[in-house]
Amino acid sequence: MLRKLLGIAPKLESDGSFSPSKFAIKMGVPDKTDFENISYQKYKGTKSKILVICTEEKNLKMKNGKYFSTGNHPVESLLPMLHLRNAGFEFDIATPTGKPAVFEMWAFPKKDEYVNAIYKEHKANFEKPQSLSDFISNSFDQSESYAAVFIPGGHGAMIGIPNDKNVDTILRWAHEYELFTISLCHGPGAFLSTTIENQEFLYKGYNIAVFPDSVDNQTPMIGYLPGKMPYGLSEKLKALGAKLMNTKMDKTVCVDRKLITGSSPLASNELGKLAATELLKALRH
């Protein structure tokens, strides 16, 4: 009751899950982003497509049994897409089974005209995406048309996707054909799929920026999460051989070979700029 009076109790949703408290929303969800509307020299070649792997899952089970109302973080999804679109790329939207992509609408920056515009532009595709199996069947023989795979952040990326064999197949396809792989925050949870069936971690030895477990461990105190995370993502990646490039929730981004990653929602704009710049540079050479 005291936590509710102080505004730090997670909000109970109609399906029994919990979204962040009023205090956490006030502290961590701005109405506008730091998006920079940069004019890129647009790419006009044949490798113009980017596969966006979104989660179709909403509720992440915490250690205490409570469910966090999550999905794809809108800023972590849409800011990188804004930069990549402005650089001349287009998107194929997919979810594991073809169910609609789920967004953390409580985190949507309602007064940001750019984020609102690109969300509306792709809303129909978010609502009717293709399945990963269909993408594998229909698009793997068109590798020359793709520049990258993008996995948005949001805690929802940790539901099912890290254990999805199709995600593993797509990441290995991107690696084999030297496509870029782009992700941020909790999106690198998808990289765990490459260890299915005791395979060696595909990104062993890579520099990776990812959301720090230390922050996830603190956020239940302000009602952002309704409990402790089921496992620590950054420590799991580190244990598999990744070299972590950040210890804080900040704007850290990094590129290592064809892997481009960012540390948190605060890095969304920087990740978009880095990804657009790296793709344009690589494809023009």
Image: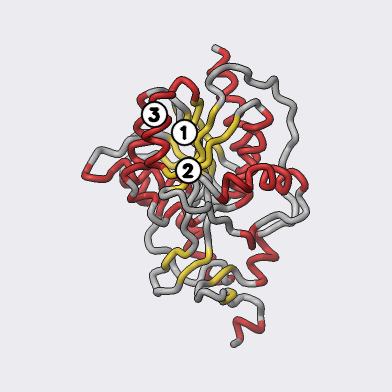
Amino acid type at circle 2 is Gln
Compare marks 3 and 2 and give the one earlier in the sequence.
2
Taking the spot 57% from the left edge, 48% from the top edge, the residue there is 126
Q: Please state which of residues 108 and 133 is positioned toward the viewer in this rendering.
A: 133
Q: How is the image coloured?
A: secondary structure
| Residue beneath the point at 66% across and 80% down | 6
Q: Which mark is residue 181?
A: 1
Q: Nearer the viewer, residue 135 or 272?
A: 135
Q: Quadrant of residue 49?
A: top right
x and y, in percent, of residue 180 in the image: 47, 29
Circle 2 is placed at which residue position? 130
Which residue is label 3 attached to?
140
> From the image, which quarter does the C terminus lie in?
top right
Q: In front: mark 1 or mark 2?
A: 2
Disc 1 residue type (three-letter):
Thr
Q: Residue at x 54, y 56 (%)?
A: 102
- Contact? badges 3 and 2 (CB < 8 Å): no
Q: Considering only vertical position in the picture, is 107 above or below 7?
A: above
